[in-house]
Amino acid sequence: MRYVYLGDRMTADRWRGQGCDPVRRPDGRCVARRGTALVVFSDGSRIAVNRRRLRLTPEARQGSGGT
């Protein structure tokens, strides 16, 4: 998983602190609009979340730089 979703006070407990990956368009860019990003969690749930509440995992931070 590339990101950890921190959540906010309205976030369900099952998604808070969970790892997720961005959903990508055919050209490889992330699906994002107006401060939100579409992510997929390990259970297959696709949810639009606030991008400010996403954090890179340490593995992704050390990884390939920006991809």
Image: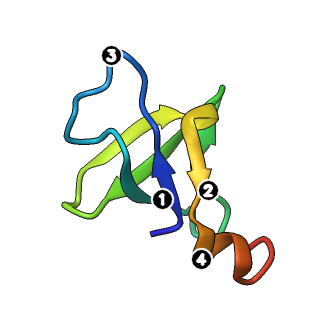
Q: Quadrant of the C terminus?
A: bottom right
Q: Disc 3 marks which residue?
A: 10
Q: Quadrant of the N terminus?
A: bottom left
Q: Position of residue 59 (x, y in %)?
A: 59, 77
Q: Quadrant of residue 51?
A: top right
Residue 1 lies, with reference to residue 49, above or below; the image says below
- Going by the numbered disc 3, the residue's amino acid type is Met
At x 62%, y 56%, the residue is 30
Q: CA distance from mark 3 to mark 4?
A: 28 Å
**Of 66 and 37, the residue lying toward us:** 66
Q: CA distance from mark 2 to mark 1?
A: 6 Å
Mark 1 or mark 4, which is nearer to you? 4
Residue type indicated by callout 4: Glu
Residue type, numbered disc 1: Val
The residue beneath circle 2 is 30
Per the model, the C-alpha gap separating discs 3 and 1 is 22 Å
